[in-house]
Amino acid sequence: MTSTWVKSLTPTRFLASSAPIGHTGGMARSIRIATRAEQLLGCAVVSTAPVAGGDVCTTTKLRLSDGRMAAVKTRTNPPTGFFATEAEGLRWLGQSGCVAVPEVLAVAEDCLILSWIEPGRASAEGATEFGRNLAQLHLSGAPSFGHKAEGFIGLLPMPNRACDTWVEFYAVRRVLPYLKLAVDRGQIDPVDAADVERVVRRITTLVGPEEPPSRLHGDLWNGNVVWDAQGNACLIDPAAYGGHREVDLAMLTLFGLPQVQRVLDAYNETAPLADGWQDRVSLYQLFPLLVHACQFGRSYGSRAGAAAREYL
């Protein structure tokens, strides 16, 4: 789970012929990034600026000679296919025509270059529109519960092999793999782990009515919803797959999305949710809580245990 380019710092003017690569660490890195972007885009980089935020990748803002602004995401030794998977997810979401996503300008094994989103603040109108658009995204559907290729959530591998039913997919592709990893890493108490397992054993009675697969963002927490300068929502950093739409909605409420109630109200007006969906929010938060436990520590393992006990 990564956050976005929400604040650019002082820009560095980039002139490839005038600054020695070894001059300073920051300058050398800026030159390397700019040079790589020029190779991929076929367009000169006028300036670069580091962007605050992000715990998985480093993001740099680029000003291009043709007037465009771009964001380049880099990481030292990323997992194989890491950036290509993100690019494919953005394109898959964008193909729906329902939500705004940054345009993929270039992708390589070592980086991803996207159109720049000028950050702003959420507006009431933008939140309402986002709710409607998210509903339409989900309704655009997916071929199956799963996706055509394995994915990533944060730096963790995310299994996507299709299952016949949502119940099976959520249990064996979303909850149990991260529960096992959290246990192996010592990031969840044995009592909490046992309670999550007890919920999985009775999950058939908890998941709600059957629905066809929805086209999910997959990692739809607050940091992956960027409000642009006009107050409209743009989605970044997907972990996309076909799944149950309540998972995206549960994640939206987990870390405090601005104006989330407006989003949910507009969503429910556009694509009404099944009865009892509010009672399943904690069930569908088990997945991101366990992912967070694997990456960020035992406090999230404790939260996963508490969420599980709501259903025991």
Image (spheres, rainbow, N blue to C red):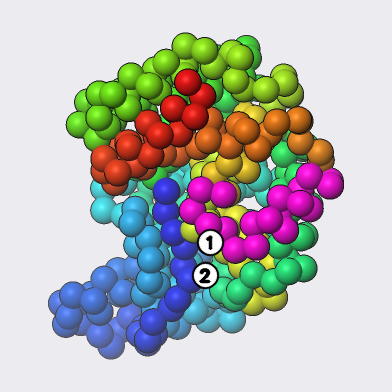
User: Looking at the picture, how far across and down is residue 128, in whole percent?
Assistant: 76, 60
Q: Secondary structure at mark 2?
A: strand
- Which residue occupies 42% across, 48% down? 1
CA distance separating discs 1 and 2: 6 Å
Would residue 62 appear left or right of 76 to someone viewing this image?
Answer: right
| Residue extent of the magenta highlight | 253-270
Q: Earlier in the sequence, mark 1 or mark 2?
A: 2
Would residue 14 appear left or right of 171 to someone viewing this image?
Answer: left
User: Looking at the picture, how far across and down is residue 210, in whole percent?
Assistant: 72, 19
**Type of residue at label 2?**
Ala
Are the two marked residues, 1 and 2, in contact with CB atoms closer than 8 angstroms?
yes
- Residue underneath mark 2: 70
Picture layout, residue 149 above or below residue 204: below
- Which residue occupies 25% across, 24% down? 190
| 23 and 44: which is toward the camera | 23
- Residue underneath mark 1: 114
